[in-house]
Image: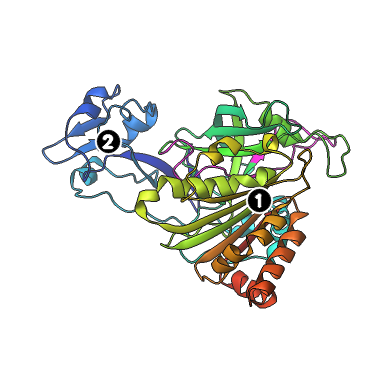
């Protein structure tokens, strides 16, 4: 199955990087379907033979990583063997026409508009953000992903049950960027006898996959057992996803999101403010930066992360292992015994000097994700920090929005 957009079916083509390949013949000897061949110049991959197998047997043995190269292509016009034999370098990623935004389902548009209302309506993406693919799969023609892992993130004694779920798309092209969302279609019917409507989840992995160069992505999902008023409910999609077993299949639509994207230019700073599963896009951006530390791609990373306790905080262990010179982490815990309640806005004010320094830098981008109730406190914290450091938040905020530097997704 390939992504359909404006009459073009997008497929994921396996290629070999001629600049890195040392012509050791390991890949050709390893391939069980004889998809790899060579001439005196290049090693190449037959699109049809490789695509029908997609066994990945050649990836591990390659000593240089040249074999682990991929491009999104028009399925009807993939790179031929003759094309590949002629290359000195890999071609750049081709662009494809996108589905019209008007085709996005009404319920998706409504959820997105509500989530981003705190940023003052639609916002431009960062000027250096990568080009996103949008709405490649519809409710009528969803992509099918296979569950490759479902791991509980929160401690056994924690009240919240939050999972890290890995979805693999196999041969289906499903390109995503950090900050985008996907829609999940839970099976079955609602109380009216109609199919469940789509539920949106932020992607928790970077653009090159939860496992680098594999066609997969991760979600951070909290099992919903009560509503915001504390009344017992069973969240349809969250319970469905948290109960999935390895090997089961999920219907996925999207991807969605052309605004909440990370900057890619050198020296860009990112302030990330989140609670609970709002950590998903922050993890994606952090992982992107971590994998590219040697590229000198970005500036400062500053994270404000709120939860009831460390046991309730997703990714607490991995976050604690990140170098302090890579990311400035600030945890706010609101339900710790013998300690006063602390929220993300308290830490923003406590770190006022450093926050103000970043706010003065035109290369700083702000991302907020989590519960709707956090918006007011965060806004008030920025207002106070600016007031204490000779800045006017009421003037700065509209400028940040206009420049694509202030993004909110709350629920």
- Is residue 196 magenta-colored? yes
Majority secondary structure in the magenta region: loop
For disc 2, the marked residue is 45
Residue 219: name its quadrant: top right
Q: Seen from this angle, which residue lies furthest left?
A: 40
How crowded pointer 1 is (Cα within 10 Å; few <14, some 14-19, many 20+) is rated as many
Q: Position of residue 399 (x, y in %)?
A: 61, 75
Q: Is residue 401 above or below residue 288?
A: below
Residue located 55% across and 41% down the image: 319
Residue, far front: 338
Magenta residues, as a range? 184-212
**What is the secondary structure assignment of the residue under circle 1?**
strand
- Image height of 254 relative to 30, above or below: below
In the figure, residue 351 lies in which quadrant?
bottom right
Q: Which mark is residue 195?
A: none
Kindly state the secondary structure of the residue where label 2 is placed.
strand
Q: Residue at x 74, y 55 (%)?
A: 374
Give coordinates of residue 183: x percent, y percent. Answer: 64, 43
Q: Which residue is mark 1?
A: 274
Residue nearest the viewer, comparing 360 with 275 = 360
Count neighbours of disc 2 (C-alpha within 10 A) and say few if under 14, some if 14 to 19, many if 20 or more. many
């Amino acid at each position: 199955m390939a992504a359909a957009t404006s009459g073009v079916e997008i497929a994921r083509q396996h290629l070999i990087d001629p600049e890195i390949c040392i012509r050791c013949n390991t890949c050709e000897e390893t391939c069980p379907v004889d998809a790899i061949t060579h001439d005196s110049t290049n090693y190449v991959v037959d699109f049809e033979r490789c695509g029908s197998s997609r066994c990945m047997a050649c990836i591990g043995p390659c000593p240089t990583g040249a074999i682990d190269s991929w491009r999104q292509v028009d399925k009807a016009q993939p790179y031929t063997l003759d094309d590949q034999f002629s290359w000195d370098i890999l071609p750049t990623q081709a662009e494809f026409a996108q589905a019209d935004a008007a085709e996005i389902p009404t319920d998706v548009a409504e959820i997105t508009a509500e989530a981003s209302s705190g940023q003052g309506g639609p916002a431009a993406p960062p000027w250096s953000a990568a080009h996103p693919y949008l709405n490649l799969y519809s409710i009528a023609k969803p992509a099918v992903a296979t569950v490759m892992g479902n791991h509980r993130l929160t401690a056994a004694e924690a009240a919240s049950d939050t999972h890290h779920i890995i979805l693999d798309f196999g041969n289906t092209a499903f390109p995503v960027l950090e900050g985008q969302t996907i829609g999940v279609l839970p099976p079955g019917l609602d109380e009216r006898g109609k199919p469940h409507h789509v539920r949106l989840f932020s992607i928790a992995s970077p653009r090159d996959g939860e496992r680098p160069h594999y066609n997969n992505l991760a979600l951070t999902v909290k099992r919903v057992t009560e509503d915001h008023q504390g009344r017992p409910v069973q969240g349809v999609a969250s319970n469905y996803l948290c109960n999935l077993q390895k090997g089961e299949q999920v219907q996925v639509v999207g991807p969605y999101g052309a605004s909440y994207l990370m900057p890619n230019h050198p020296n860009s700073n990112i302030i990330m403010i989140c609670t609970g599963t709002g950590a998903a896009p922050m993890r994606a951006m952090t992982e992107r930066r971590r994998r590219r530390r040697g590229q000198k791609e970005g500036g400062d990373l500053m994270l404000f992360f709120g939860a009831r306790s460390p046991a309730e905080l997703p990714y607490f262990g991995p976050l604690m292992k990140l170098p302090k010179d890579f990311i400035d982490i600030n945890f706010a815990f609101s339900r710790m015994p013998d300690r006063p309640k602390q929220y993300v806005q308290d830490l923003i004010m406590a770190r006022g000097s450093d926050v103000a320094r970043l706010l003065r830098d035109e290369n700083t981008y702000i991302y907020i994700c989590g519960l709707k109730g956090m918006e007011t406190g965060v806004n008030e914290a920025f207002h106070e920090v600016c007031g204490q450091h000779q800045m006017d938040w009421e003037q700065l905020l509209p400028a940040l929005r206009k420049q694509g530097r202030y993004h909110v997704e709350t629920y």
